């Protein structure tokens, strides 16, 4: 278990939508409602879908925008790594917050998400880390309701900080928070969920032509609602509930591991 957080934690804020994203401003306000020691280190441009990637073939460029406020030409993982091992090496963050992402990060999305990756890198460094994402489009509106994240974000993070201070938050777990697409006063509760299985956001490759007649391709998705199982992150968001899902960085599937070990042992003995 990690040590209990101080009453005024040093908070590192990052995202994958870029330094100028409105969701980052929402997250800064959430962080500032919890502490007066907030550092912002975010990508210079959008890094959606970057996953837990590092920039190994290009240098990282750091630009100071204001005191404790930096942009990095790199991924969310780069941002957290640079912040923890360089900018804040003498006093590393007590908490990493990543987001607020424009769009939900649930079900299969968590493996692609740069927002999740920012929190995952904080977890790698032994820092309690939370990814926050604002769903939109599920209610038929194209608008992103940042006011939902700002209204419910402090409540969710405070509850998780209490959980951490009680000694119940393992060091190898990050927390994934998703806010529903609705009015803030329509949110019914905060629900602890498991990762769901997306069965509707079918990815497609769309072929187009540029101005010179050359082919190019876009990855697109069918936006259709599914019927997810109760207790999942998808079900919670569809039902106007804030979802909190603990995610583990160890991807080993233990049941298959045990079966595989048994089968291999039998085969070697035959």
Image (cartoon, rainbow, N blue to C red):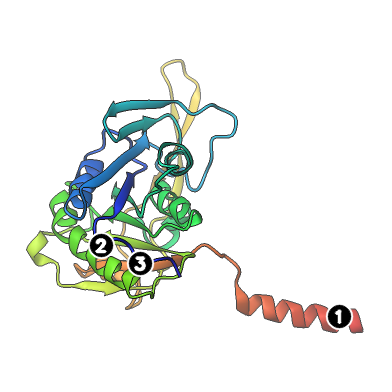
x, y percentage for residue 128?
39, 60
Q: Quick one: label 2 or label 3, which is nearer the N terminus?
A: 3
Q: Which residue is mark 1?
A: 267
Mark 3 and mark 2 in contact (Cβ < 8 Å)? no
Mark 1 and mark 3 in contact (Cβ < 8 Å)? no
* Residue occupying the far top of the picture: 212
The quadrant of the rendering that contains the C terminus is bottom right
* Residue at 21% from the left image edge and 40% from the top image edge: 22
Q: Which residue is mark 3?
A: 4
Q: Which residue is mark 2?
A: 157
Q: Residues within 10 Å of mark 2 (few under 14, many from 20)?
A: many
* Residue at 26% from the left image edge and 31% from the top image edge: 67
Q: Secondary structure at mark 3?
A: loop
Measure the C-alpha gap from mark 1 to mark 2: 50 Å
Q: Secondary structure at mark 1?
A: helix
Left or right: residue 48 compared with residue 153: right
């Amino acid at each position: 278990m990690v040590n209990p957080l101080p009453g005024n934690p040093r908070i590192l804020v990052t995202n994958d939508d870029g330094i100028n994203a409105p969701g980052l401003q929402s997250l800064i306000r959430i962080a500032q409602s919890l502490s007066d020691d907030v550092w912002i280190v975010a990508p210079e441009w959008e890094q959606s879908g970057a996953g837990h990637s590092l920039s190994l073939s290009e240098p990282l460029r750091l630009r100071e925008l204001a005191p404790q406020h930096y942009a990095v030409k790199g991924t969310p993982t780069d941002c957290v790594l640079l912040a923890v091992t360089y900018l804040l090496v003498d006093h590393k963050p007590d908490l990493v917050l990543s987001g607020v992402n424009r769009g939900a990060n649930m079900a299969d999305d968590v493996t692609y998400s740069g927002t999740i990756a920012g929190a995952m890198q904080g977890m790698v460094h032994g820092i309690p880390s939370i990814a926050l994402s604002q769903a939109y489009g599920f209610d038929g509106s194209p608008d992103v309701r940042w006011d939902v994240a700002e209204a419910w974000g402090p409540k969710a993070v405070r509850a998780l900080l209490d959980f951490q201070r009680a000694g119940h938050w393992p060091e190898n777990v990050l927390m994934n928070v998703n806010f529903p697409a609705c009015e803030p006063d329509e949110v019914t509760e905060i629900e602890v969920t498991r990762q769901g299985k997306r069965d509707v956001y079918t990815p497609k490759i769309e072929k187009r032509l540029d101005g010179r007649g050359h082919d190019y391709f876009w990855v697109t998705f069918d936006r259709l609602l599914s019927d997810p199982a109760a207790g999942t992150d998808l079900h919670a968001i569809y039902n106007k509930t804030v979802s909190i899902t603990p995610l583990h960085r160890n991807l080993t599937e233990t049941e298959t591991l045990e079966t595989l070990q048994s089968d291999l042992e039998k085969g070697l003995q035959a």
